């Protein structure tokens, strides 16, 4: 069984300074690992300090000082953490995966899964493309692409800033975005931060001073009122409702796909939902559907109530009258299997074609959150209200699970929704009677 304390913590050592071939050379004792995983003590590979002959020769005192500054001082620092002779790959498998990544949400696990191959194995000799059309026969594996400059087989104590700089520099040279290189740098930093916390490494984090090119972010887009109205006109009903929710409630697409019927109150009276009060005409944002899995929202500030305009309430009540997927635990926007619809499929089938038709090829779900912020600002909703409505992390909120938008904000959103429905010439959903609305809310 593997133990963290297999190697002893060593005292400071002076090393062995000797002459060879006209040069001062230095070696020291260090721990090694046998093939069976056992530790043994042996000499390190010698390093060259400087000349010991000729006009620029170093004295023994000068050579010993340089050996201390450049090698032995770092060595003594790492001798306090003998586990740092383990490779980065071994540390990731034995400590980082079960103690750090295992506690991440689904999105975080997927992020590390995509970035760790770059850190451990290196940069592919050719850039990997997304969504390639190459097809393989059943049981046939795609050919492995050689990678270079990974740090997985290096010892924790041996990785230097220059190794990480070479890794991210190669990524930039081969066409990866600055954002991708930043992700790799961040993962390396997280590995060494956890190694220090676990007592497997001491000293500087090698990712700390790695330089990256300047990041040029894509220009964010927001739809004008007229653009949003025209977009709603040409979308099919279900997608139209999702877009309306995104633009008028600030919910992101993962929150919309993760919305369940039990978290909707389509009536004029408050109801009880999971031991908390759900105010009238509100949706409670508590879960999200991301990359095929349910999870809680990504930040506490995202746990919020959002106001549902009247047109949305009627459209949701009409949607609730479908034959399948209408129980309290079912998603509001369900696909044919009962799971939430695929956001990327909606984008490719409906949003992108509609955006191209309206001269908005950049259209995406995230643009609709920018649209909400822009329209809310135009309607004079205060910055404080907008932060709370959008669930930003720096919103000054107390008791976030009971906070609701003010009466003034609800009135403004209702007025804006009515203007949008009129401008888009949206046919009003068949208005359900009070009994149907109560049935739809589970009362």
Image (cartoon, rainbow, N blue to C red):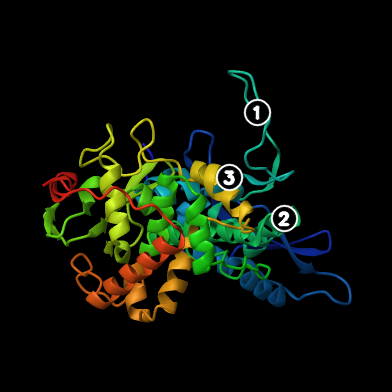
Q: Residues within 10 Å of mark 1 (few under 14, many from 20)?
A: few
- Answer yes or no: is residue 172 visible: yes
**Which of the two residues, 299 or 316, is positioned nearer the viewer here?**
316
Badge 1 element: loop
Label 2–label 1 contact, CB within 8 A: no
Which x, y percent locates residue 272? 11, 54
Is tag 2's residue or tag 3's residue first in the polypeptide sequence? 3
> Disc 2 and disc 1: Cα gap in Å?
24 Å
Q: Which residue is found at the position 14% from the left and 48% from the top? A: 438
Which residue was labeled with disc 1?
Answer: 142
> Disc 2 and disc 3: Cα gap in Å?
14 Å
> Disc 1 and disc 3: Cα gap in Å?
16 Å
- Answer yes or no: is residue 96 visible: no
Which residue was labeled with disc 3?
Answer: 117
Q: Is residue 127 left or right of residue 84?
A: right
Is tag 2's residue or tag 1's residue first in the polypeptide sequence? 1
Position of the N terminus by quadrant: top left
Q: Is residue 160 left or right of residue 261?
A: right
Image: 366 above or below 350? below
Q: Residues within 10 Å of mark 3 (few under 14, many from 20)?
A: some
Image: 173 above or below 134? below
Which x, y percent locates residue 107? 43, 50
Which residue was labeled with disc 2?
Answer: 170
Of the two numbered discs 2 and 1 in the rendering, the one whose residue sits closer to the viewer: 1
**Which of the two residues, 12 or 146, is positioned nearer the viewer here?**
146
Q: Which residue is found at the position 25% from the left and 47% from the top? A: 317
């Amino acid at each position: 069984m593997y133990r963290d304390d297999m190697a002893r913590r060593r005292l400071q050592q002076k090393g062995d300074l000797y002459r060879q071939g006209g040069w001062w050379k230095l070696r020291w004792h260090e721990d090694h690992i046998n093939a069976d995983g056992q530790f043994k003590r042996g000499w390190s590979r010698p390093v060259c300090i400087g000349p010991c002959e000729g006009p620029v020769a170093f004295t023994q005192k000068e050579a010993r000082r340089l050996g201390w500054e450049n090698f032995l001082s770092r060595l003594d620092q790492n001798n306090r953490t003998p586990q740092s002779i383990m490779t980065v790959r071994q540390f990731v498998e034995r400590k980082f995966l079960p103690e750090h990544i295992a506690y991440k949400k689904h999105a975080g696990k997927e992020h590390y899964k995509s970035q760790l191959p770059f850190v451990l194995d290196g940069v592919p000799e050719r850039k990997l493309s997304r969504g390639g059309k190459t097809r393989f026969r059943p049981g046939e594996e795609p050919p492995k692409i050689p990678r270079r400059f990974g740090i997985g087989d290096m010892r924790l104590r041996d990785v230097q800033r220059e190794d990480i700089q070479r890794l991210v520099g190669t990524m930039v040279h081969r066409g990866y975005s600055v954002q991708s290189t930043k992700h790799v740098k961040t993962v390396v930093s997280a590995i060494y931060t956890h190694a220090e916390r676990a007592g497997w490494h001491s000293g500087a984090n090698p990712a700390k001073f790695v330089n990256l090119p300047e990041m040029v972010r894509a220009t964010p887009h927001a739809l004008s009122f007229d653009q949003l109205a025209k977009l709603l006109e040409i979308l099919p009903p279900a997608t139209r409702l999702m877009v309306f929710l995104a633009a008028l409630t600030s919910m992101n697409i993962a929150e919309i796909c993760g919305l369940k019927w039990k978290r909707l109150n389509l009536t004029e009276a408050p109801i009880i939902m999971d031991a908390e009060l759900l105010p009238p005409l509100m949706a409670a944002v508590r879960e999200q559907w991301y990359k095929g899995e349910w999870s809680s929202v990504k930040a506490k500030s995202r746990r919020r109530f959002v106001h549902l305009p009247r047109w949305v309430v009627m459209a949701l009540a009409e949607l609730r009258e479908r034959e399948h997927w209408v129980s309290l635990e079912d998603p509001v926007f369900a696909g044919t299997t009962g799971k939430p619809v695929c956001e990327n499929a909606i984008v490719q089938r409906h949003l992108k074609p509609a955006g191209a038709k309206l001269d908005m090829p950049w259209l995406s779900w995230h643009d609709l959150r920018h649209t909400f912020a822009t329209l809310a600002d135009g309607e004079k909703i205060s910055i404080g209200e907008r932060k709370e409505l959008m669930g930003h992390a720096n919103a000054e909120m107390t008791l976030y699970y009971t906070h609701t938008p003010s009466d003034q904000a609800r009135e403004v959103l209702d007025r804006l929704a009515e203007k949008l429905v009129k401008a888009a010439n949206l046919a009003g959903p068949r208005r359900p009677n009070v009994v149907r609305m109560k049935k739809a809310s589970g009362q």
